[in-house]
Image: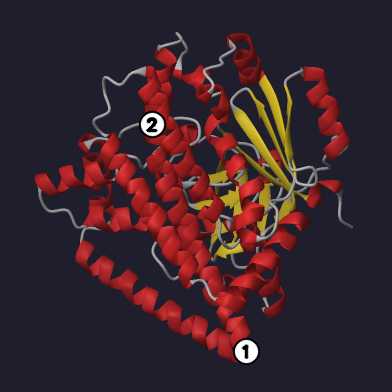
Amino acid sequence: MTTKEDVWFHWERNATITPIFMCMEAWAEPTTKYHGTPWPTTICIWKNDLISWNNENEDFYNMGRVLVENFLKNGWSKFEDEINTEARKIAQFMKDSNNSGGMSEQELVKKFRELHDLWIRWFLLGVTEPVGVYGERVLEDLSKDKKDFSLLTTPVRKSFSRREFEDLLQIKSDQELEAHAKNYSWLHNNYFTTEVLGKEFFEEELKKIREKYPDPEQYLLEIEKKDEELVLEKEKAMNELGFNEEQRNLVKLMEFFAWFQDYRKEYTMKMLHYVDRLLEAIGKYHEFSLKEMKHTIPREIFENKFDKKLIQKRMAHFMVIWNSNDAKFEFLIDEDEIERKKVEIFGQKQHTKEIIEIEGSIANKGRVKGRAFVTMSAHDAKNIKQGEILVTSMTSPDFIIAIKRAAAIVTNEGGILCHAAVVSREFGVPCIVGTRNATHLIKTGDLIEVDGNHGFVRILKN
């Protein structure tokens, strides 16, 4: 029986308001005009630095169906050209903004508006989640078992996390290391914090991976061979399943969107550096901290209307609802009103009975036992010990240090296009995604078994 909890897609992470709200702006009215279908009603709730992003799964499915049918009918080469055009615009903005010191407040706001508009366009194109939800359901129905499904949904293009790893592995000089640090300085940026990684960080990482892979050239040859074998295995699976041309194109489309979701994150992480720097500089004119500025709404910056008390209330508890039927936003900051609204939308929270086996989708095969490390924070995830199992809501690229150390990965949400699914396959880490409630049922220190061969997580001992 489907419960009210099963109806909803939930994404939980540390995040501030400004960058997330810009995503909501992109996925509001502009999406309908560009894609011909509205972004579904979205509920975002911030409390004590943690966001819960919520959509109804069926809404995602229905939107994804429209998008996929359109791409299968018309192709997506023109769409990919638009993506690459926008990426070049972002790259040019970043190049032009590296020496923006000494700007007046008016100039800074103008620069922020330019970045805001680039962000809107980037996420207007980046409707990857609904496509993934729809494609996953269709391919799951077409597959004969979970192993076939996992194979068909494995991406064939390299993620930027893997590119960075391979680039680092091949470094032979101090000069190359400095260039690498410059190219990947943004690797730990996220919707909550940003930091500039320097040469020392990558020098330490290189030392660790060389201990693990003493013969990098041989290792790189082996993973390239695995890539080639993957393409052949997917072709064989489609032949055995009797896929027609449209079904094969669906697999290719999912491969493309898996790449695009990763590409979207890469440029988003780069842009976040400039979001923070511009907000920090604008905030100094009003004696606002960076954190306070990151809880503003863009129009407040454009209109030069700042309310410190309102911002501090948002930092404690804030709800934003995008209603696709009315095509408008609703903002709530009163604690009691937010709680009433949550009950109205999601229902009363149910007491969870004790569960020792949790089902999810296989993102990468393998079977591992270990102690759980449960966190919603990429920053805290860096404290995971080698061999522990990472349990979180969803991973993102700033989790990569934890992923490299983890014996396995378990997530509440995510499907065939999610970061955990892509990167776990590239780094050979067993992974189960879409468990819905792993972070609520598993505690840090629990002994658990991740069965990536059958799609289960078992709690062995608390």
Residue 361 in view (yes/no): no
Quadrant containing the C terminus in the rendered view? top right
27 vs 200, left or right, is right
Q: Nearer the viewer, residue 311 or 181?
A: 311
Q: For residue 433, which numbered disc appears in the image?
A: none
Depicted 98 relative to depicted 127: above or below: above
Q: Within 10 Å of the Cα at label 1, are there few (<14), some (14-19), or many (20+) other Cα atoms?
A: few
Q: Which residue is drawn at 67% across and 76% down?
A: 145
Residue 220 lies in quadrant: bottom left
Q: For residue 111, which numbered disc appears in the image?
A: 2
Report how many numbered discs are placed on residues in the image: 2
Depicted 344 relative to depicted 120: above or below: above
Secondary structure at badge 1 equals loop
Residue 332 in view (yes/no): yes
Identify residue type, mark 1. Asn
Q: Which residue is drawn at 41% across and 53% down?
A: 86
Residue 131 lies in quadrant: bottom right
In the picture of the structure, the residue carrying the numbered disc 1 is 244
Secondary structure at badge 2 equals helix
Cα separation between marks 1 and 2: 49 Å
Q: Where is residue 313 in the image (x, y as percent from the top left)?
A: 66, 15
Q: Nearer the viewer, residue 405 or 143?
A: 143
Q: Where is residue 106 in the image (x, y as percent from the top left)?
A: 39, 21
Depicted 166 relative to depicted 151: above or below: above
92 vs 238, left or right, is left
Comes first in the chain, label 1 or label 2: 2
Q: Within 10 Å of the Cα at label 2, are there few (<14), some (14-19), or many (20+) other Cα atoms?
A: some
